Image (cartoon, grey):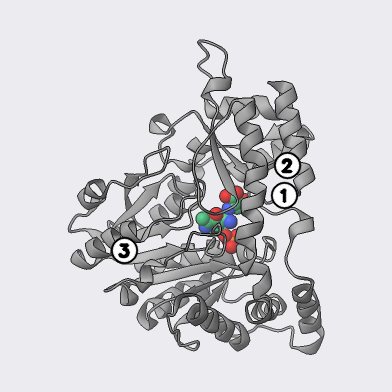
């Protein structure tokens, strides 16, 4: 079998959700909203109606026109970036396929790709399989700051691509304009392309603005932006994603997409078009809703003994559990998460899973997901307080 994949464990999200189910534990691990918080009713109706009112045969390879138009209009509204819906927008099976297709389409063997760690777990296997040589730049806790000198040192004559995820999973960091300006300057200087994973673009807390790197000088023609209905509408099971960018880059990615999945279920595409056009209230309200949920956790977790790391967005919270370990304990984040699932009945994600090399990753951090009902968040806090 293929060396890249056969050496991999099952993704941590599946591993921890299965473990949570086995122990009947409160699952604040894998990132998905509770059913009570899922997307607008109007979108479910639109999906069902589309199944009856439209063809149920292969839709166009690039996506149904309604959704590509809606994606283009959403881009113009949110970022001011005009997108030609016919040539600059592609619909994919979730952001996951957009990422995979982009790596396959943009890279040749030996091309160097810059990533920031911690990083989402699909990036490295897919990019490596596409021939990439990863160059990883560390973000430094507790504020996950970026050292621009370290970023600069990662660029070489072989650098082809930079991958940026903002707002960021797992840290909740929203990259600042200053950091983006430094990145833009380096990308222009080294003629480097960018994949912008912006699936959490609407999940910023009030007072924080998501800025897309594509809007900075010199970046328009070198950036692909990726979005996801899973995150924008809290419908993670729908697996509808989209990608926008310069015509030549989108055309290249479409060549990979046509042989990965060819197309995406059309009823769901039409429902997502309805959502982007008509359900702005839902996604524009997510940031404020999520900030309240984060606040529900923060004070209680601090009282229990967790140290909370700062964040400005997403539905993830990273906490340092060192103070909760018995004197002299060498327990790491994976062992801690297993113990908590089995003994406290709360499931979290070990942050070292977001590092290529667990040996050099921080081993004192866990990720909580808080796009859950207040009752479930309270139950988790109560269980943890009781346990510790
Ligand atoms: N990128 C990031 C940073 C993610 O957290 C996720 C997971 N939700 C994805 C991409 C994949 O998104 P999708 O479910 O749309 O494939
Ligand atoms: N993005 C989600 C998370 O970070 C999980 C997606 C998945 O399970 N593949 O929790």
Q: Nearer the viewer, mark 3 or mark 2?
A: 2
Disc 1 + disc 2, Cβ < 8 Å: yes
Reading the image, the residue beneath label 1 is: 372
Q: Quadrant of ligand 1?
A: bottom right
Residue 65, disc: none
Query: Residue 257 in the image: x percent, y percent?
Result: 50, 73
Q: Between 387 and 109, which is closer to the camera in this rendering?
A: 387
Q: Is residue 44 above or below residue 376?
A: below
Tell me the quarter of the picture where residue 138 sits: top left
Crowd rating for badge 2 (residues with CA inside 10 Å; few <14, some 14–19, many 20+) = many
- Mark nearer the N terminus (3 vs 2): 3
Q: Nearer the viewer, mark 3 or mark 1?
A: 1
Reading the image, the residue beneath label 2 is: 377
Which residue is painted at 32% across and 77% down in the image? 221
Decide if residue 265 is on the left or right side of residue 169. Answer: right
Which residue is painted at 44% across and 33% down in the image? 358
Query: Residue 70 in the image: x percent, y percent?
Result: 58, 83
Q: Secondary structure at mark 1?
A: loop
Residue 108, disc: 3
Cα–Cα gap, marks 3 and 2:
45 Å
- Mark nearer the N terminus (1 vs 2): 1
Q: Between 351 and 183, which is closer to the camera in this rendering?
A: 183
Image quadrant containing the C terminus: top right
């Amino acid at each position: 079998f293929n060396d890249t994949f056969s050496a991999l464990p099952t993704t941590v999200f599946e591993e921890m959700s299965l473990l949570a189910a086995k122990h009947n534990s409160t699952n604040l691990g894998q990132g998905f909203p509770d059913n009570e918080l899922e997307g607008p009713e109007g979108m479910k109706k639109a999906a069902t109606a589309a199944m009856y009112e439209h063809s149920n045969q292969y839709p166009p390879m690039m996506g149904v026109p309604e959704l590509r138009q809606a994606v283009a209009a959403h881009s113009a509204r949110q970022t001011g970036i005009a997108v030609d819906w016919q040539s600059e927008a592609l619909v994919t099976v979730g952001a996951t396929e957009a990422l995979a297709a982009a790596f396959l389409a943009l890279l040749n063997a030996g091309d160097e790709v810059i990533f920031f760690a911690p990083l989402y777990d699909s990036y490295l296997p897919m990019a490596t399989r596409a021939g990439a040589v990863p160059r990883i730049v560390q973000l430094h806790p507790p504020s996950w700051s970026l050292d621009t000198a370290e970023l600069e040192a990662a660029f070489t004559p072989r650098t082809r691509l930079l991958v940026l995820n903002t707002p960021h999973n797992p840290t909740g960091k929203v990259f600042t304009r200053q950091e983006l300006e430094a990145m833009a300057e380096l990308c222009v200087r080294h003629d480097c392309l960018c994949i912008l994973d912006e699936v959490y673009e609407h999940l910023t807390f009030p007072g924080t603005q998501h800025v897309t790197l594509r809007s900075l000088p010199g970046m328009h023609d070198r950036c692909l932006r990726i979005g996801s209905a899973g995150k924008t509408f809290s419908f993670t099971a729908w697996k509808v994603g989209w990608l926008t960018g310069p015509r030549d880059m989108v055309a290249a990615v479409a060549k990979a997409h046509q042989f990965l999945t060819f197309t995406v279920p059309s009823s769901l595409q039409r429902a997502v078009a309805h959502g982007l056009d008509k359900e702005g209230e839902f996604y524009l309200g997510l940031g404020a809703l999520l900030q309240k949920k984060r606040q529900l956790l923060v004070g209680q977790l601090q009282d229990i003994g967790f140290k909370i790391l700062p964040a400005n967005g997403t539905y993830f919270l990273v906490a340092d559990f060192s103070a909760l370990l018995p004197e002299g304990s060498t327990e790491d984040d994976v062992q801690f998460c297993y113990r908590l699932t089995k003994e406290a009945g709360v499931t979290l994600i070990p942050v070292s899973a977001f590092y290529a090399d667990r040996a050099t990753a921080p081993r004192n951090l866990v990720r909580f997901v808080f796009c859950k009902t207040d009752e479930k968040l309270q139950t988790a806090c109560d269980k943890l307080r009781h346990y510790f």
